[in-house]
Image (tube, rainbow, N blue to C red):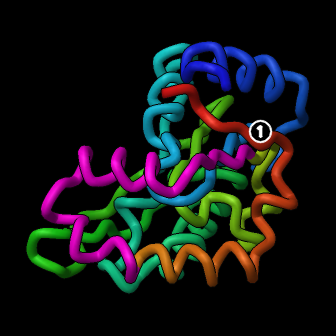
Amino acid sequence: MPDRSSLARDLLRRISARQPACGTTRVLSIDGPSGAGKTSLAHAVVEASGAPVLHLEDLYRGWHGLESAPPAAADVLAAVAVDRVGHAPTWDWVRERLGPDVTLAPAPLVVVEGVGAGARTLAPFVSLLVWLDGPEDRRRSRALARDGDTYAPWWDVWAAQERQHFAREGTRERADLVAELAG
């Protein structure tokens, strides 16, 4: 099990050997179930590369909205692929309604992270797909430590959506790399 910094360096090495699939942009997608460390790995990649990141958490339409994020992210990446700035409405988790747009400009490397980042609708844009996982008890502890009381009542609802999504999409099986972060 690598630490996030060494895995981030490995991913940057791997993706630099891949062809851009989103116009002139290489897209690194980091997917896996909640609490696996996707966001922390994305931050390590961003820290090492300066790449912009698209967090799917910003695009889910609430606690029942996992499936809303991949099509929104695909729209953003479709714009980037033709050298335009992509836009998609965010979700205001506090007010439970649409928020301001997230924007993403073309760049040599873009990181897409979150549950659904490896969805088939995003596959045409992705140069490297990473699947992060870990034991459920550890993932749950991480997620609840991160989001606390906000997430606790929704864990089972979200986990059920994840299972359905991953079974249909075959994300782990399609991943270029499967990993578990140390700690």
Reply yes or no: does residue 149 show up in magenta: yes
In the image as oriented, which residue stretches furthest toward the left? 95
* Figure disc tally: 1
Residue 14 lies, in percent from the top left, at: 83, 25
Tell me the residue at 39%/72% (across/down).
Answer: 60
Q: Which residues are magenta?
A: 130-157
Q: Pick the residue in front: 110 or 133.
A: 133
Displayed quadrant of residue 91? bottom left
Q: Regarding mark 1 in the picture, which secondary structure is present there?
A: loop
Q: Is 16 or 176 nearer to us in this picture?
A: 176
Q: Which residue is mark 1?
A: 24
Say left or right for 79 vs 41.
Answer: right
Residue at (27% x, 53% y) in the render: 144
- In which image quadrant can residue 3 be found? top right
* Residue 104 in view of the camera: no
Q: Nearer the viewer, residue 129 or 160?
A: 160
Residue 38 in the image: x percent, y percent? 52, 43
At 54% from the left edge and 14% from the top edge, which residue is drawn?
Answer: 48
Image quarter hosting the N terminus: top right
Q: Position of residue 79 (x, y in %)?
A: 61, 60
Looking at the image, residue 166 lies above or below residue 48: below
**Amino acid type of the residue tagged 1 in the rendering:** Thr
Residue 171 versus residue 11 in the image, above or below:
below
Residue 164 visible in the snapshot: yes
Give the residue displayed 32% in from the left and 63% down from the top. Answer: 101
| Residue 112 appears left or right of 126 | left
Q: Quadrant of residue 4?
A: top right
